[in-house]
């Protein structure tokens, strides 16, 4: 039995997943939207059902069962999905009470991000002898994007051995550290 909207005659019919990126690196968080629709393909703003997710990717980390609230107005944004396997992957949403009310989204999952380039900025040239400088290191991935999730350790080296005092090794959560 389909859920009826508060006496208006509209009947909850289906879910739709939108705003999935065309591609995403494995391990990156994916944000997407689930919208409930009525029999006229209008947003079912009274929807307060509970949804469950499945995926073609056995290594995916899926959002847990979620109950829409009245303040969602039939539209809920999720940002806690990650895929773990390269290739075309799908996610399916289903209302736990109305098994026929489903929706599906897909994305192409690329290889996981790796640090490809470390860029130093804010280095004063020429520099003053024995004066400390602040530097910023920005981490870029193999796709040329800021690696916002980089959490590796970076060490510093110089071809001016003995003439430069270098910072200690640093772990850079969030892609930028100084």
Image (cartoon, rainbow, N blue to C red):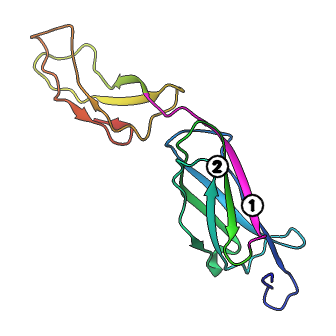
The boundaries of the magenta stretch are 99-114
Q: Residues within 10 Å of mark 2 (few under 14, many from 20)?
A: some
Q: CA distance from mark 1 to mark 2?
A: 14 Å
Give the labeled residue for mark 2. Answer: 56
Look at 23% across and 25% down and name the residue there: 155
Any magenta on residue 159? no
Mark 1 element type: strand
Number of the label disc, if any, that sits on residue 103? 1
Quarter of the figure with the C terminus: top left
Look at 69% across and 52% down and name the residue there: 19
Q: Position of residue 131 (x, y in %)?
A: 13, 23
Q: Position of residue 15 (x, y in %)?
A: 75, 66
Describe residue 72's horizontal placement relative to residue 100 as left or right.
Answer: left
Please say if the residues under marks 1 and 2 sit with CB atoms less than 8 Å apart.
Answer: no
Look at 69% across and 67% down and name the residue there: 94
Describe residue 123's horizontal placement relative to residue 37 as left or right.
Answer: left
**Quarter occupied by residue 5:** bottom right
Q: Is residue 123 above or below residue 13?
A: above
* Nearest to N terminus: mark 1 or mark 2: 2
């Amino acid at each position: 039995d389909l859920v009826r909207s508060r006496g208006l005659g509209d009947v909850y019919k289906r879910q739709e997943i939108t705003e999935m990126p065309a591609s995403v690196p494995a391990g990156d968080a994916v944000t997407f939207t689930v919208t409930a629709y009525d029999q006229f393909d209008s947003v079912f703003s009274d929807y307060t059902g509970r949804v469950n997710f499945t995926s073609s990717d056995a290594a995916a980390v899926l959002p847990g069962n979620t109950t829409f609230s009245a303040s969602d107005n039939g539209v809920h944004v999720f940002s806690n999905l990650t895929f773990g396997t390269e290739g075309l992957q799908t996610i399916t949403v289903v209302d736990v009470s109305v098994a026929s009310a489903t929706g599906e989204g897909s994305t192409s999952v690329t290889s996981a991000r790796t640090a490809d380039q470390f860029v130093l900025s804010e280095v004063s040239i020429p520099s003053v002898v024995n004066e400390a400088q602040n530097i910023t290191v920005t981490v870029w991935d193999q796709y040329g994007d800021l690696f916002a999730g980089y959490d590796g350790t970076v060490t510093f080296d110089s071809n001016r051995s003995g003439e430069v005092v270098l910072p200690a090794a640093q772990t850079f959560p969030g892609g930028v550290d100084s």
